[in-house]
Amino acid sequence: METQTAASAPSPSRASVPGPWRMAGRSLAANRSAMTALAALMLVTFACLLAPFYAGDVARTDPFTSNVAGSFMLNGHEVDIMQPNDNPLHLGLSPVGPTWNPSAYMLGADSQGRDVAARLLYGGRNSLLISFSAALVCIAIATLVGVSAGFFGGFVDTALSRLMDIMWAVPVYLFAISLSIVTISQGLKIGPFTIESDNLLIPIFIIALVYVPYAARPIRGRVMALRNAEFVMAARSLGVPQHRILLRDIVPNVSTTLVVLTPLLTALALLAESALSFLSIGVQAPAASWGTIIQDGEGLIYTRPMVAIAPGLAIVIVVLALNILGDGLRDALDVRETSRRGA
Amino acid sequence: MLLKFSQAIGCAVALSATALAPAFADAPAPGAPASPHAGGTLRLAGQGMLGTMDPQVSYLHIAYQVLNVVYDGLTTFSKSPGPLKRQAIPDLAESLPPPEDGGLTYRFHIRHGVYFSNGKELTPDDVAASMRRIFKANSPTAGPYYSHIVGGAACLHDPDHCTLAGGVEPDDQNWTVAFHLTHPDSEFFDRLAFLHAAILPADTSTHDVGNNAAPGTGPYRIVSYDPNTGLRMERNPYFKQWDAEAQPAGYPDAITYTFGMDPEASVTAIENGQYDWMAENAPLDRLGEIGSRYADRVRLIDFLNLYYAALNVNIPPFNDLRVRQAFNYAINRKAMVIHAGGPTVSIPSCQLLPVGSPGFEPSCAYTKGASPDHPAQEWQAPDMERARQLIKEAGVSGQRVGIVSPSVPSYVAMANELRSTLADLGFVVSVRAITQAVQFTYIQNSDNRVQVGLTGWNADYPAASSYLQALLSCGTFIPHSDNSINISGFCDHDVDAIMDRAASVSVTDQKAGDALWAEASRAIMAQAPVVPLNQVRWVTLLSARVHGEIRAPIYEVVFSKFQLR
């Protein structure tokens, strides 16, 4: 009875000190920069999710089909998508520029006569999907590697650490380009499974793989520190099995590191995906990503710079937002920092 | 006293030199035309490399423009501006000899007083040795162009011991060379005008000379060549112009060619006066700029080229005539013209003979309202309805189709247009863009099972055979080979018979021969082994200091005719 009363009545200490996740949440919510970044990210993601609606119901265009010989209606007039240049020799044609009208080539057309705005949204879906998925896969592999190396030590640590060192020694883009060229040209065959060269899983796994050393190292360091922590030593002294220590004591304490790493890795993955797609070894035509759209705009940089600027701006906004959010999360989850602010 | 005398002599010499200097400065360099615009260094820029400097081996179009001012053949094509003259003209030969033995023998009189750049005089023996060298150096056209010289077949079989005995007979007494053929050839003078029949000194190595160019008889000689960085040509000190139409004297004293400049960089460099000419077509995104700002420095150059998609007629789905015809009906050739830079620089193509080539007759079988039996005069619009009907009849909708394109942006844009068209017809389409140098051989090899190969073709000389017979005759399809220019793998013996008849009739009656070539072209398009796309004009930009007419049919530009202010 007394116990029940004690349990039901909130103790003064629990009421005044919330849990670490709640504290982090509050700290993050109070960080205006991080909240602005999160809002920007959500806005971009939401807009990209609406790509089929925009292309089908607003712009009424197929962003994956060449349409250089086509035309569209603007303010009641039929306008050719490719327009003759104004010069005495009548040399060359340029795609229509931005009309700023959402229903009529708002950001203009690319050299294939496709709606840049619609492709930007579709491209964003692929870029965000690849970068976020690659970050999650990378985190999963890095956690496995980092935790194993840090916790077991000895031969396991030496073998995994040297492997990571070797991967680290190869410049990340060179590594990614090499893997991409091999897989993009022929697809990927793993036993009975065949992944076609235009499958998004290929860039996802390549980007995830090349960033594993970058995530595994801090995780290994954190695990090594935790392995010698008093509560882990105490658990060992009490005879708690290793797998239980690993799952109940080590991994939960690494989770803050993982949460902080996720947006930062997503930003890196987005840049890598854009670079690979720009080089034609990432997302394959006719699918789009922000990198492929920049490539489309490369040849139009003098006449229709918007084709390259729009996806470039999108990349800048998302990468900036992810980095600011990552910084905010790191600040929010840093116990000492939070304690100091609380004090 | 002695000092004063020597000073006086020195002053007199100095004064004399000063007085005479302008007179010497105005004198043209040896071999240069007497013009105030002779002299200076012409600076060329290009992205690609030129490959071997062996005129009998090189098969790169870009190298021809360089090598054509260094080497001569017995015949050549006119290097004067104006409309295309299809007939070859004499070059190192005094004249075009009349056929003997019913077209089986030609006896050329060789010009006297022509010297190679090493100072050695041209002799009939050099001509005979050069003909043998075509086989010994494994020239890529030894088989198709020269194997009908008596002894040529044996030379193809055993190049190292090639003698062309009974086929090429030099006569030092009469300064003639006689050629004996196994069968009459209406294009023999054309073939001798092609660069692979360039005349070299008899002692030239029989192996590919690579970077070390052999002496030639043209107005320039190659003094240095690094395939990675550039090339320099200077005047051939022994050159004396014998015929301005065949091999004009050169205006610039020297010509430099820098490699590794991409077209965008080349345009900017020419605008800034750092270079005088660029090898590549001006990039599409710069056409508006150069057309408005430098219209007087832009040159549009016609050449007999053609872009087309080769359909592999031996594997699905294009082993079905209906599918090939459907693709031809569906393709939007207006879009292809737009991709090439618009109607000023491109026209749609409906057949494999470009406009202006011998044997060309307007005929478009695959356009709205036309058919192979009732062709229209020119392309109007795609006929998607007819195309879809044919695909439905063939029952191939949903099949996968792969397009292999060069990774050059203009080609990739065209490949994407083809992809969109095939996707519209219900195929699942992929595009593979690979480096142009690799792509051209890759799509030729039947082992690679390429379904659609996108490419372009520029004939070696202006003859219908160099399009139709070269690209689509049974003899040019070599299975499992990288050197099978009949990319479609098309072989129709009825069409071959028409082409053989056309070649034969052309020996005596060019007009009747042309009519037969036109018939062959229509017969080929009825089978639709290719999708002809478009023909383009080349847009090039010159620096402000270049003037004079630099264009010539076949050669496009002649470097020796660039006059520098």
Image (cartoon, grey):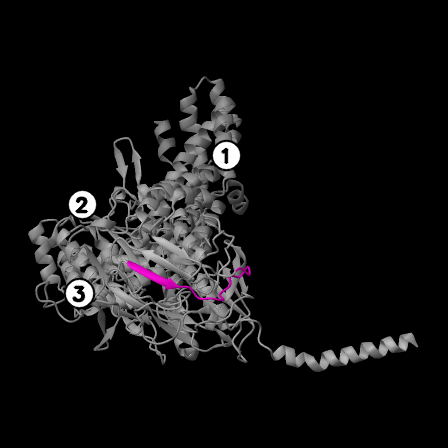
Residue B206 in magenta?
Answer: no
Q: Residue furthest right?
A: B1
* Residue beneath disc 2: B315
Placement of the C terminus of chain A among the 4 image quadrants: top right
- Work out whether residue A121 or residue B60 is closer to the camera in this orientation and state it: B60
* Residue beneath disc 3: B518
Q: Main secondary structure of the magenta part?
A: loop
Height in image: B498 above or below A131? below
Say whether residue B468 is left or right of residue A313.
Answer: left
* Residue beneath disc 1: A166
Query: Residue, x 46% and y 39% (percent of image)?
Result: A215
Give how far apart the Cα atoms at labels 1 and 3 are.
65 Å
Label 3 crowding class (10 Å Cα cut-off): few <14, some 14-19, many 20+?
many
Q: What label does residue B172 carry, if any?
A: none
| Residue A147 place in picture, x, y as percent | 45, 30
Say whether residue B195 is left or right of residue A74.
Answer: right
Q: Amino acid at mark 1?
A: Ile
Q: Amino acid at mark 2?
A: Ile
Say whether residue B1 is left or right of residue B93.
Answer: right
Give how far apart the Cα atoms at labels 2 and 1 are.
46 Å
Q: Which residues are magenta?
A: B105-120
Kindly report which numbered mark, 3 or 2, lies closer to the viewer in this rendering. 3
The reply to whether the C-beta atoms of the residues labelled 3 and 2 are less than 8 Å apart is no
Q: Is residue B166 visible?
A: yes
Identify the secondary structure beneath mark 2: loop
- Work out whether residue B288 or residue B214 is closer to the camera in this orientation and state it: B214
Q: Amino acid at mark 3?
A: Ala
Q: Chain of mark 1?
A: A
Height in image: B254 above or below A144? below
Name the quadrant containing residue B498: bottom left
Label 2 crowding class (10 Å Cα cut-off): few <14, some 14-19, many 20+?
some
Q: Is residue A36 visible?
A: no
